[in-house]
Image (cartoon, helix red, strand yellow):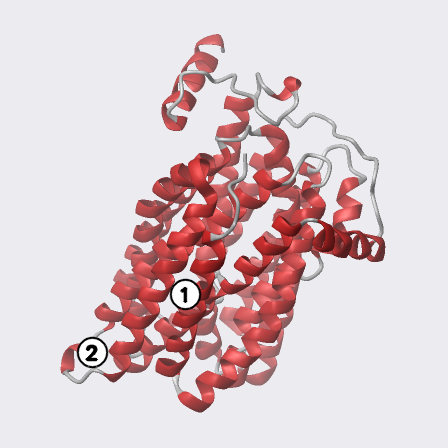
Amino acid sequence: MAEHDVSQSRLYEWLTGDDDSRMCDDIPESACDEQPHNFFLHVWASLGNKLADELSSARLVLPWLMGIIGAPVWMVGLLVPIRESGALLPQIFVAGFIRLKPRRKWVWVTGALTQACAALALAVLALFANGTLGGALVLAVLVLLSLARGLSSIATKDVLGKTIAKRRRGTLMGWSGSIAGGATLAAGAVLMLFESRPGNLVVAILLVIAASGWLMNAIAAARIQEAAGAVEGGENGWDSIKLGLSLLKDDRTFLHFNVARALLLSSALALPYIALLGQNQSGTDLGGLGILIVVSGLAAMVASPVWGKRADHSSRGVMRDAAMGTTICCLLAASLAWLPGEWTHSIWPYATIYALLVIVHHGVRLGRKTYLVDMASQDNRALYVALSNTLTGVLMLLVGGVVGAFAQWFGSGVLLLILAATGAGAMLSAHQLPEVD
């Protein structure tokens, strides 16, 4: 057992690029010795979560599911807003509840198990649902999945802040993203081989694997050694909103961060429209879905460790550079919509730009997560995360509707130009953020 602990510490030091595994900035002293052990449990938990997220993606997999069961097209447009806002909106109401728990990992476990059950329900619907009723049931299950995702999200960040030191969190998220990208790459490659199989069966299998990923997430989270934390300051939902609004007023850095984060939504909103352009030009068979999943996994595997390391040095810089990348990718995708030639009827040009934007989007996510966790303290981290996520959820619903209307009226090409301009605004806003210590 002692040899295992030594090997684990050495691997931890190699992955983090430091020869001191007892570097314990901003975490309790009691958590210091457990940090290498907890680091790898966080990696396993994140692997399961990220793999499950990719294989139940509202940007790729669930639209295919809706098409297979013959759901109305307007329901497809609700997938991304429900998935994103459902996970973010309620968080301010549960932040106070989580604050009352001395060990927050059990809230995380509950959310992960609920997501696993929801993924299994979606797999059943893939096999047996049909038409408008089937589409409505998919949306209803997606609401449950999204609410559970929000519950896990806020607890995960709070546990991360209690168990992993500063200057290690971005590296952790980077390595876990890379490993999950490799697993997703393998899943997409297998899917490409089964493009002639019944679509509903293949999608159901993907969703069962997603359920297994969330089960892995729950098991790893349950094994994390989390010291009991302070429970003072728990608030009900409305009190949390009042306190959160006062934070926005008094903490100018937090307000500025949320403005930059709002503008950075352009990377998430652009992804499904680039995929949609590829579908419209090349068809909707499962081979095309497999290609997009493969390039998404490959992009995550390559990008996440690089972004993670950089985020530990300057999460502000990562947000800025990712915003610039969003602008470039949106401009490239918009140009494809108007270029002539047979080559634009292949999935590959769109898959290439989609992969580049996935790389950029991982930078957005890692940069803003690391910035938010490092900006907050142990006493207010849960509230900062919950408030920021709730604000983003509101904006996702509002902006998502407007974006959908623009795409309907003017086409995906014009919409991507608008998102390119938004990305440029995000770049300027993130550049003006102060560095966090």
Is residue 34 or residue 404 the one in the foreground? 404
The picture quadrant where one finds residue 106 is top right
Quarter of the figure with the C terminus:
top right
- The amino acid type of the residue labelled 2 equals Thr
Q: Mark 2 packing: few (<14 Cα in 10 Å), some, or many (20+)?
A: some
Side of 102 where 212 appears, left or right: left
Q: Residue 424 carries which label?
A: 1
The residue at the far top in this view is 2
Residue 419 is situated, as x and y percent measured from the top left of the image, at 42, 72
Q: Where is mark 2, residue-wise?
A: 344
Q: Which residue is drawn at 36% across and 50% down?
A: 300
Q: Where is residue 105 in the image (x, y as percent from the top left)?
A: 67, 37
Q: Is residue 150 visible?
A: yes
Of the residues tagged 1 and 2, which is closer to the observer? 1
Q: Name the residue rendered at 44%, 79% in the picture.
A: 67
Looking at the rendered structure, the number of numbered marks drawn on it comes to 2
Image-based side of 304 in relation to 344, left or right: right
Mark 1–mark 2 CB contact (< 8 Å): no
Which residue does the image show at 43% across and 36% down from the upper left? Answer: 313
- Type of amino acid at the residue the image marks with label 1: Ala
Compared to residue 313, the image places residue 288 above or below, namely: below
Q: What element carries label 1?
A: helix
Name the side, left or right, on which 37 lies relative to 201: right
